[in-house]
Image (cartoon, helix red, strand yellow):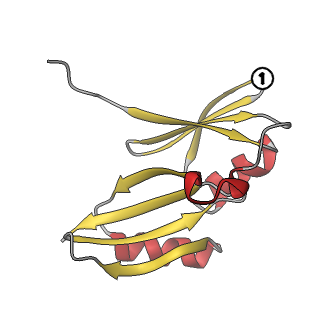
Amino acid sequence: MSDFTKVRYTLAVLDLAKSTDYYTSVLGLSIDFTAPGWTFLSRGSFRVMLGECTDALPPAALGDHSWYGYATVSDASALFAEYRAAGAVFTQTLSDKPWGMREFGVRTIDGHRIMFGQEL
């Protein structure tokens, strides 16, 4: 059986420049490379491809269907503090969950929602 070696989320965004700025300045990802209409970003093993789709339904209009990822991190408390200082909008604040995770959620400027958690 083959193992996954990387996971990259592919997201439609309304304004590529604004979304790229959010992912770099607020979420701390680095730009790996760009192509016309695309930005490829990463932070460690967390990878995202942003594709500009100016006519797409905004993720914020999708309600619960705007969730796209859960990233396990080494220090959820430190990441939460980093994102709070950077001005992230939280869907859930940092808390310990009965399923053994310390986690929090953020909402991007497009309305995509991401969870970050640390195993307790």
Quadrant occupied by the N terminus: top left
Q: Which residue is pictured at 33% across the width and 64% down the height?
A: 117
Q: Is residue 57 above or below residue 109?
A: above
Q: Which residue is pictured at 40% across the width and 54% down the height?
A: 70
Instruction: Point out residue 62 in the picture as x, y percentages from the top left corner.
Output: 66, 53
Task: Tell me if residue 110 can be seen.
Answer: no
Query: Looking at the image, which is closer to me, 62 or 4?
Result: 62
Q: Is residue 33 left or right of residue 72?
A: right
Q: Is residue 117 left or right of residue 67?
A: left
Q: Is residue 52 above or below residue 15?
A: above
Q: Label 1 sits on what residue type? A: Pro
- Residue that numbered label 1 is attached to: 36
Instruction: Point out residue 87 in the picture as x, y percentages from the top left corner.
Output: 65, 74
Quadrant occupied by the C terminus: bottom left
Q: Is residue 82 above or below residue 13?
A: below
Instruction: Point out residue 5 in the picture as x, y percentages from the top left corner.
Output: 29, 28
Q: Which residue is pictured at 39% across the width and 34% down the height?
A: 7
Q: Which residue is pictured at 59% across the width and 53% down the height?
A: 66
